[in-house]
């Protein structure tokens, strides 16, 4: 799993659907989430701190998903609402973003406890907490991405050119993701993630 900040959405070749960069970005975030689930499934409740890759994956998810959600609220959803002629059409997806943020915070708390060198390490209750927090987040991300890809993206693909989608959605999302502030320092005096 990469420890680097996301590169943003790639440019759209003319032959691709207008939403291809958004679909690729979803795929990338889903793969990182899947790796998090694998790491948690492989973990043993032995009292030792959990694999540091878990912390890197959590930090990557925060640096990727939170700016992505905010950018969708600012650029993707207004375009979908305009195309649907209904400004409330995307309200459930914005609510999903609030839950995704909440679930990321819950997962961060579990990851912090499990990876802390000064704590009790990965105990059976902590491993259970990791499974629950990661499972909730993964499930919501999966359904959220599917709703966008099956409902909103076809609407954009049918009503916008690749150039329009790039200019009105993809480029602004990229710009917003690149200017996202770094995540705040971790609690209990530990260093901030160097992302």
Image (cartoon, rainbow, N blue to C red):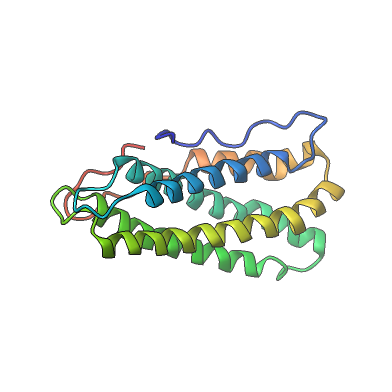
- Residue 71 percent across, percent down from the top left: 58, 50
Q: Position of residue 191 (x, y in %)?
A: 22, 43
The C terminus, quarter of image: top left
Viewer can see residue 188? yes
Q: Estimate the x, y position of residue 101 in percent, counting from the top left.
A: 46, 61
Camera-side residue of 5 and 182: 5
> Would you identify the image quadrant in which residue 31 lies?
top right
Farthest top residue?
Answer: 13
Q: Is residue 105 visible?
A: no
Residue farthest toward the left in the current orientation of the protein: 118
- Residue at x-position 64% and y-position 69%: 92
| Identity of the residue drawn at 78% across and 36% down | 163
| Horizontal side, residue 21 vs residue 52: left or right | right
Left or right relative to 42: residue 83? right
Number of disc labels = 0
Image position of 64 (left or right of 118)? right
Q: Nearer the viewer, residue 114 or 44?
A: 44
Q: Position of residue 73 (x, y in %)?
A: 60, 57
> Vertically, is 142 above or below 54?
below
Residue 134 quadrant: bottom left
In the displayed orientation, state which residue is furthest to the right.
158
Q: Residue at x 62, y 61 (%)?
A: 143
Q: Quadrant of the N terminus?
A: top left
Q: Quadrant of residue 148?
A: bottom right
């Amino acid at each position: 799993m990469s420890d680097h900040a996301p590169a943003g959405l790639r440019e759209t070749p003319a032959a691709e659907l207008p939403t291809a960069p958004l679909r690729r970005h979803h795929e990338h975030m889903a793969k990182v989430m899947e790796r998090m689930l694998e790491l948690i499934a492989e973990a043993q409740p032995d009292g030792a701190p959990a694999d540091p890759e878990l912390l890197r994956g959590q930090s990557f998810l925060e640096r990727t998903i939170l700016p992505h959600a905010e950018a969708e609220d600012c650029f993707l959803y207004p375009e979908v609402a305009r195309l649907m002629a209904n400004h409330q059409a995307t309200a459930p997806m914005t609510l999903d973003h609030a839950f995704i943020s909440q679930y990321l915070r819950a997962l961060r708390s579990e990851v912090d406890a499990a990876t802390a060198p000064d704590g009790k390490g990965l105990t059976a209750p902590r491993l259970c907490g990791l499974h629950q927090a990661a499972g909730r987040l993964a499930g919501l991300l999966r359904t959220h991405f599917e709703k966008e890809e099956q409902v909103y993206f076809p609407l954009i693909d049918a009503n916008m050119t690749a150039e329009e989608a790039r200019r009105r959605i993809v480029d602004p999302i990229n710009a917003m993701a690149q200017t996202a502030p770094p995540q705040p320092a971790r609690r209990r005096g530990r260093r901030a993630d160097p992302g």
